[in-house]
Structure formats: structure tokens, C-alpha cells
Amino acid sequence: MVLIIDSAGKIKKAYLTGGILLPGSGGGGVTSVTATTPLSSTGGATPDISITQATGATSGYLSAVDWTTFNSKQDGLTAGIGISLAGNIVTNTLPDQTVALTAGTGIGVAGTYPNFTISNTSPSSGGTVTSIDVDAGTGISVSPPGPITTSGTFTVTNTAPDQVVSLGTTGSGLAVTGTYPSFTLQNTLPDQTVALTAGTGIGITGTYPNFTITNSSPSSGGTVTAVTASAPMASTGGTAPNLSMPQSGAVQDGYLSSTDWNTFNSKQDALTLTTTGTSGAATLIGSTLNIPQYSGGGGASIVRLTGQTLTASSWTLVSGYYTYTFSNVNITVNTRVDFTPDNTSYLEVTTCGMQTQVTVAAGSCTFFSLFPPQTNITGEVTIFPTI
């Protein structure tokens, strides 16, 4: 049986195998069709079966719009060499790697990363072909045999020309005459009779190729005796079937639950990285992550300490905040200290809730965080002059 379902999830028509439309005007047969969530049925002998669209609060079918939204989301991340993943925290475990090039024979290398100069120190020492050979396949011969090591010519010959081509006549109703390349194929059993036999409640009139098939017992009760379903749907069968569909999972096809819909809908959209500006904190707005291209130097009265590390194990819980003491002789009670994380520490700073508030004392300052960092935080410490 074939079910025709419209875009709203409702059954419009039902066909038996062979294309016969079921009139469905008589009694008997299927007397009641129920359905299990997220499917629904109006019940009775002429049920309307439907399925609602899945939302954050309702299980149901997955709409094309939601499918496009979910398909555009960030795939699961896999840590490569020098990268570690802990939840949604990405950490560079191999920063500041040394890049070096080693010169091989006839090659010269000068300079340091990222500027190398590679030169050919033996431009006239090219290679020379010393031997050429040819392998012969079936029906082919090559002379002379063996490789040519100085100069010469290979001769390739077809040793099996003019092969016989024939057609068998083992097929039923088929005769073959003639020889290659001219064959004649003849249908020896033309005009075969085509007849249709009517089953119970079916009438057939006409002859091949024009037949008329009618339901000769339109009021003799329902003709649906069993309802089956294809995965991921399931049916209990019989005259009062229950149609159901399991919830989809990692190894199960099925309907999308509202819980999974909320999980998918809450995932981070694919990120777009920008590098606008040369100062200030990095920002994440929607799916755009902007990390300024920080520049070094500055005025003589401002001290910029790049490549500083706030060790994860050195944070201490004090009065509801986790604190970290940073020492430097340029810090006084009248200076202002800012910390700018580098690209690899931005997510960790956001996750642990590192505060912009910094307290200063003679020779040191204190940074504050809502939660203890799980990994070391690296970045630039900027010490501003007396304020």
C-alpha cells in the first residue's frame, strides 16, 4: 500500500500495490486508527493522521528552515597537534614553536623564520635517464627485449589480430543470424497474449493494451486489512493499527524531540574571525569573533609587558573572588594596570569571568576572577603612568 501525505503531515490518498485507488466508502476493515506522539489521529473509520512541526517546546517533524539552520552550525571540534579541548575551551598546548629549515645536497638556506631564502647551489648538476624498458601485455610483443641503456627503438606488435566475435542464441524467443560485424537479431515469439485476471471485488474489461479496472463492490466494506510502516515509523498492524515513530538519537532514526531541538538551536553558530583594530579587548558578537592585531611599543612612560603568563594553579580564593598577584617594579600605588589576553587565552578569560578591576600596590597588582581558571592565561600586561 502507498500513502500520499501532504506538506502538513496529513494522509491525502491511499493506493494498493498496482495503482488501484481505494474508495474507502464502505464499512468494516479498519475501524479505528490511533497514533503515538508526535503523530496524532482523529480516530474513527476515516482518521486524519498528522504530525506537528518540531519546536523548542514541541516534538514533531523537522522543517526545512530548521534543517538549514542546524546544518549551518559549527561541527564538533577535534583537537589537532598542539591543541587541547576541554568542554568549550580551546587551548594552544605548543605555543612559540621553532621553525628551521635544513639544506640538502645542492640546496642553500639563509635567514630565520618567517623569512627564509632557499637557493640552488648546484644549478648545473641535473639528473640523467640511464635506462628505458617496455612491458608487453596479452597479445602484444615488444622487441628488442629488455631495457635500452644507450639509444635505440622499441617495436610493438599485435600478436593476436582478427579475433572471432560471436553472439549466443540461448535467450528465449530470440534468434541470431549472420557473422561479425553484421548480425541479425529476430524476435521468434511475437504477439504474446497479455491478460488480466480480476480478483474479489474487482472487474476487468477490454483487451491489451487497453484495460478498464473497476471496483465491483464499492459498498462491501473496507478493503484495507493491514497497515504496515517503513522505518523510522512502526505499525502494530491489523484492522485497528497504532502508528508510531521512535525518538531520533545518535544511532536511531526518528522524530526530533523538543529537548534535542533546544540543544541544537542553542549551539554556537559557525564563527567568523575578524582582526579589526590594534588595541582593546577581543569581542564575540553573535557569530563574529574580533581579535585586534595588538602592536607593541608605545610612549616612554607606558610599560608594555608582552608574553606574560598567569599560572592557573596560582589563583587564590579571597572574599568570594579568585585573585592573582602580579609583581613588577614599575607598578606603584598611583599607576593603572590593564591585562589584554592573547588569541589563545580569550575563551579561558571569558569562561572564568576575569574582571577588568585591578588593584595596585608598590611593586605588584592583583587581578580578580569569578571562577578559577582551568589553564594558564597568557597576554600583555600594560602599566600606565601616574594618574
Image (cartoon, rainbow, N blue to C red):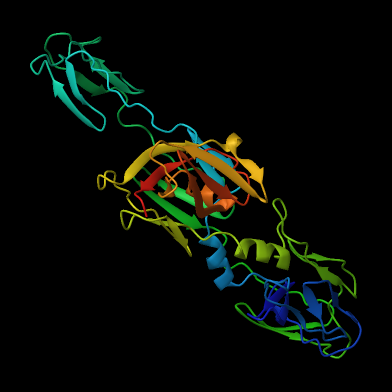
Q: Is residue 354 visible?
A: yes
Which residue lies most toward the left here?
Answer: 124
Q: Where's the C terminus, which quadrant?
A: bottom left
Horizontal placement of 330 versus 230: left or right?
left
Residue 201, quarter of picture: bottom right
Horizontal placement of 168 versus 248: left or right?
left
Above or below, comparing residue 382 to residue 216 in the picture: above
Horizontal placement of 68 versus 3: left or right?
left
User: Which residue is at the front of the view, 323 or 102?
Assistant: 323
The image position of residue 198, as x and y in percent, is 78, 77
Above or below, comparing residue 33 to residue 84 in the picture: below
The image position of residue 118, as x and y in percent, is 17, 25
Image label count: 0
User: Which residue is at the front of the view, 283 or 340?
Assistant: 340
Q: Is residue 227 visible?
A: no
Q: Residue at x 82, y 84 (%)?
A: 47
Q: Residue at x 33, y 49 (%)?
A: 294
Above or below, comparing residue 288 to residue 147 in the picture: below
Q: Where's the N terminus, which quadrant?
A: bottom right
The image position of residue 170, as x and y in percent, is 56, 45
Above or below, comparing residue 235 to residue 319 in the picture: below
Horizontal placement of 209 versus 58: left or right?
left
Q: Residue at x 25, y 10 (%)?
A: 145
The image position of residue 102, as x and y in percent, is 27, 18
